[in-house]
Amino acid sequence: MDVIDGHNDLPWRLRVRDPEGRLDLSEDLTGTGLHTDLPRLRRGGVAAQFWSVYVPNDRPEPQAAINVVEQVELVQRLATRYPDTLAIARSAAEVDRARAQGRIACLLGAEGGHCIDNSLVVLRALHRLGIRYLTLTHSRNTGWADSATDTPAHGGLSPFGHEVVRELNRLGMLCDLSHVATTTMHAALDTTTHPAFFSHSSARALCDHPRNVPDDVLTRVRDSQGVVMVTFVPFFLRDACRQWGEELTRVEDALEPPWDTPAFLRQRQAWIDANPCPPTSARDVADHVEHVRAVAGLDAVALGGDFDGTELVPSDLQDVSAYPALFAELGTRGWSERELRKLAWDNAMRVLRATCG
């Protein structure tokens, strides 16, 4: 079954781990620590992937604007290096064309509004480079939007934040509400004229993480004919994992920075080894999929795994080859082939077509 996935962080992982481009993604890289390569994408049925052209929150905004362009160029280089397998896509029509050619459509999503450097001109330039969604925040607030995981500063969106949403509408870009505060979700939905879109979030009713979507927002997703692309990150699946992640953060805060020194990483890993995260599986993801369906409807649910953006994954969803395991779990719950196709492909493509053409 063909899959369109809303979020994969491989470009940043490659930037950090393989800056000289020596890894060959045409090989099965299982065991290297990466969740993604071309053979496993094929085995998972991934026919279209939103690659996150992510830049960390700690970059000054002018630097983030430069770095996001570098991330776009990285994905473009991958498509050039593997032309028989990958094709850049800027619209639903181009996704359809790549799929018909047997290639994986490469869509681009910018994760965090800090990368536009408070400039609609930069936003327009990113659109011209092929980026088709902007996640309004990442883990910290921007100067115009509140993040789910920061102290509120704007009551959701500032006046300029509403301008950003309107410009996304005008350009034909998806306004991604993953990572934003609930107030920001509502403020954006008050302004946008396009379907609601969450690239990688799950249901707050099942796991009380602020990154997840509450039921009152799910009803607005339904009413806007939008979509929530359910993520596989354990912190967003079970409260026990959320609580474990909060404790890990406290441990990290107590360690001597910077975070990437051998001493820091060694102490962090020692704590994880002594205090493993509670387990998750495809059953937990299926629970979130079914909750989104129950509240917002079958047409409102899709998949955004966040592979290579998380260290921890469910036991039977360990990489991009594993989507069939989730479909098998849902099949045991009575999902039909038609319903699974909506989850895997049709719903996200409908929202992409309605917004980006």
Image (cartoon, rainbow, N blue to C red):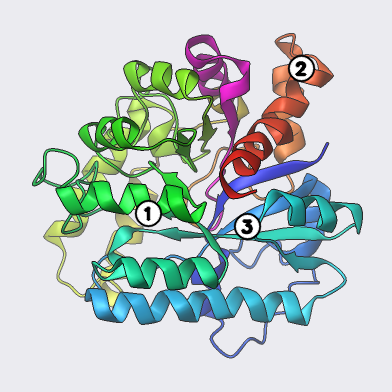
Most foreground residue, 309 or 165: 165
Q: Which residues are magenta?
A: 286-308
* Sequence order check, earlier mark of 1 and 2: 1
Q: Is residue 33 visible?
A: yes
Q: Could you tell me the amino acid type at mark 3?
A: His
Q: Is residue 11 above or below residue 166?
A: below
For the residue labelled by badge 3, is the local secondary structure a helix, a strand or a loop?
loop
Q: Is residue 28 visible?
A: no
* Residue 264 pos. (x, y %): 26, 70
Disc nearest the viewer among 1 and 2: 1
* Residue topped by disc 3: 35
* Side of 273 where 343 appears, left or right: right
The rendered magenta stretch, by its main secondary structure, is classed as: helix
Q: Could you tell me the amino acid type at mark 1?
A: Glu
* Residue 61 pos. (x, y %): 24, 73
* Sequence order check, earlier mark of 1 and 3: 3
Residue 308 placement: quadrant: bottom right
Most foreground residue, 268 or 177: 177
Q: Is residue 268 above or below residue 153?
A: below
* Residue topped by disc 1: 167
Image quarter of the N terminus = top right
Residue farthest toward the bottom in the current orientation of the protein: 20
* Residue topped by disc 2: 331
Q: Is residue 114 above or below residue 24?
A: above
* Side of 248 where 336 appears, left or right: right
Q: Residue at x 40, y 79 (%)?
A: 67
